Structures are given as structure tokens and as C-alpha cells.
Amino acid sequence: MSSVRGYFHPKTATGSSSLIPSPPWRYSGDLLTVEYRTDPARVRELLPDPLELADEEPGAVALIWADWQSCSASGGELLDPVLAQYKEAFAVVRCKYRGRTYSRCVYIWVDKDFAIARGLHQGYPKKLGSIHQTRPHPYGPAPRIEAGARFGATLAAADRRLAQAVVTLREPSETNGFVNGHPMAHHRWLPSIEKGKGLALDELIESGAASFEGGQPWVGDAELELFEAPTEELARLEIREPIAAYYRQVGVVWDGGRLLEVGTSEASAE
């Protein structure tokens, strides 16, 4: 009798071809965060039951660009950078479940297949995209992390630009914003292989960092634009009022989540 191994597809005799290793997953990254207010009704339409709008700032959105290096517990991927480095951009809103406030990622784009696989496991709605952001550096023309430094960021998918921002740092901050500051409330969905059978996997889960460390946050101002695209809906979270922009370097460990409910959503399998 033979068996196959691996945390994720493809499963093989050795497991070494698996697209992602088993957790914990470790991350080091540079984050650019732009927060703004949109119509709360546009946030509500992205929250399946039993999730509700947050009581405070129900229309707040964070659009975040992240330049990551990531690895498994061994850290071996850091010595083979193609397996460790990727970029992403994602939109986060806040919601309420049983009286508690959560963050929720409603759109996210990444540029590597292993990042998509990890996201599907965690309940992030990841798609492929083209993501770029200015990197700080202590020498040459790149910006330093200081007052007046300017960082650009762009997001595109399917050959269409979806968002662009220019962030100008102003001063050190006590926080890195508030929209993405809660545990995540995500759904893990998988349609049944049989037509008309609905969802084979339907879980509402809580997820967050097992450990976190971060550098000094900086706050500033942002020029942010969103663009219409035929296969993307980010622009529906239209910019009504800017809040603030932030820059921070962080280190995060993810090591699993917690099941909140099973089979409660009204999401369609079509």
C-alpha cells in the first residue's frame, strides 16, 4: 500500500513538491497602508451573514501594499529567495460578529502561486496581480524612513490598473491605523463537485498572528486613486473621505486559526 505526503497539492511520495509547507509561516515585510471612508452600504454588501457592519466607522477601508519575505519554520526559503519573496495589495474593512469587532479582507492580489495557496487555506480571496511599491534604503535616491519621504504604490490585475497611491510621511505614530487592527473574520468556501449540491466547505473562521513585532510606525498623507476594471470591483469601495496613511516594517508568525461557525453563510456556489 502506498501513501502520498504534503501539506497541500501536489501530494507525492516524498511531499517535497507541495506548493506550501505546513505552518507556522513566518513573514518579514514593509507595509504601506492608506485608510479612507467609503459608503457603509458598499461595505455591507461584502459581508455575508452572520457578519454585520462595525458599530464605529462602518465605512472605513484600509488599502494595504506589502512587500514580503516569508518562510516556514526552518527558514530555508530565505536562502532560495524565489520561494520566499512576494508582493501583495489588499483591501480590509471592519465587521461585527456576536458583538465583537473583526477585520476582514474583502479583496487581495498577490504575485506568486504559493501565496495564493496559503490565502485559500486562510480564507483570503486571493487572485493574481501586479503589485509594486517604493522600497526605502539608507543610500542613494531611495527614500529614507523620515519626515517628507515619499512612497509610490501601484496595483494592476488582468492588464488593468486598479489602484495607485503616493504616500508622504509626516511624523512617527503610535499606531499603524485601526482598520486592520483586529483578528480577521474570514470564510473558507469550496463548491461541491456535484452540481446543485452547494458548498462542500462553508466555515466562518477567526485568524490572526501567533506573534508580532514591528518597527516604529509613521503616519502621513496619501494621494489615492481607484480605477474601474471589467473583472474587478475594488472601485466600488469609492473614496469618500481620506483618513490617513502609514508606513511600518513588521514581523509576523501565522500558525492556524479558530473555527467560529459551520455552514451559516448564504454564499452561492455559482
Image (cartoon, rainbow, N blue to C red):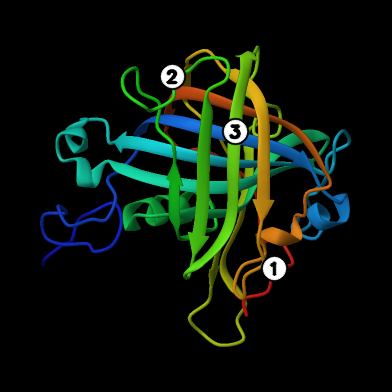
- Whichever of labels 1 and 3 marks the residue nearer the N terminus, that label is 3
Residue carrying label 3: 167
How busy is the neighbourhood of tag 2: few (under 14 within 10 Å), some, or many (20 plus)? Answer: some
- Rounded to the nearest angstrom, the CA distance separating label 2 from label 1 is 45 Å
Where does residue 43 sit, x and y in percent of width and height?
A: 79, 52
Amino acid type assigned to the residue bearing label 1 in the image: Ala
Residue carrying label 2: 144
Please name the residue shown 62% across and 76% down the image.
230
Amino acid type assigned to the residue bearing label 3 in the image: Val
Answer with left or right where residue 76 lies relative to residue 66: left
Residue closest to the eye, 146 or 228: 146
Name above or below for residue 171 compared with residue 77.
above
How busy is the neighbourhood of tag 1: few (under 14 within 10 Å), some, or many (20 plus)? Answer: some
Residue closest to the eye, 225 or 148: 148
Answer with left or right where residue 126 lies relative to residue 232: left
Residue 54 figure quarter: top right
Answer with left or right where residue 113 lies relative to residue 196: left
Instruction: Tell me the quadrant of the picture where the N terminus can be found.
Output: bottom left
Name above or below for residue 106 compared with residue 74.
below
Name above or below for residue 58 compared with residue 154.
above
For the residues labelled 2 and 1, say whether their Cβ atoms are less than 8 Å apart.
no
Amino acid type assigned to the residue bearing label 2 in the image: Arg
- Whichever of labels 2 and 3 marks the residue nearer the N terminus, that label is 2
Helix, strand or loop status at disc 1: loop
- For this orientation, the residue located farthest to the bottom is 195
- Rounded to the nearest angstrom, the CA distance separating label 1 from label 3 is 36 Å
Residue closest to the eye, 56 or 206: 56
Residue carrying label 1: 267
